[in-house]
Image: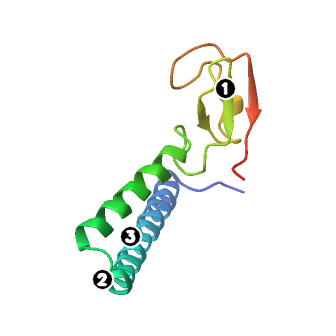
Amino acid sequence: AIGPTPQETSESGAHEKTQKNQDKDAATSNTEEKFDSLNDALAPAMSLEDTRSLMEENKKLRDLRMCKICMENDASIAMLPCGHLCCCADCAPAMRKCPICRQFVKGTVRTWLA
């Protein structure tokens, strides 16, 4: 059997990227809808600026937890000896140096948020 042609492979990759972009757009739309409903519910207690500020802070905190290598999974592996929590379990085995401080990794520790 002959494998996919380069064009078919390219089209497949483009379809996957398009699907990921559509998923991100849907997530953004969903976030905006949540923002609107949250704003409506809290309108008497919070100003629009306060709500927007909280949403931005929440996004920054989620980004901090993100794996710095694949940017898809939550970081769950701490590098030793530096202690940086920067990789997911999938990406950590490939790291010989910490991606944050470039120290050689002597070991790793799996972490969980309680």
Tell me the residue at 42%/56% (across/down).
Answer: 59
Tell me the mark number nearer the camera, choosing from 3 and 2: 2
Q: Nearer the viewer, residue 38 or 27?
A: 38
| Circle 2 crowding by C-alpha within 10 Å: few under 14, some 14–19, many from 20 | few
| Circle 3 crowding by C-alpha within 10 Å: few under 14, some 14–19, many from 20 | few
Q: Identify the amino acid type marked 3.
A: Thr
Mark found first going from the N terminus, 1 or 3: 3
Task: Give the residue at mark 2.
Answer: 43
Q: Identify the amino acid type marked 2.
A: Ala
| Circle 1 crowding by C-alpha within 10 Å: few under 14, some 14–19, many from 20 | many
Q: Identify the amino acid type marked 1.
A: Met
Relative to 16, residue 113 above or below: above
Task: Give the Cα distance between marks 1 and 3.
Answer: 32 Å
Q: Is 1 left, or right, of 86 in this rendering?
A: right
Label 2, secondary structure: give it.
Answer: loop
Mark found first going from the N terminus, 3 or 2: 3
Q: Is 45 left, or right, of 12 in this rendering?
A: left
Labels 1 and 3 touching (C-beta < 8 A): no
Relative to 36, residue 87 above or below: above
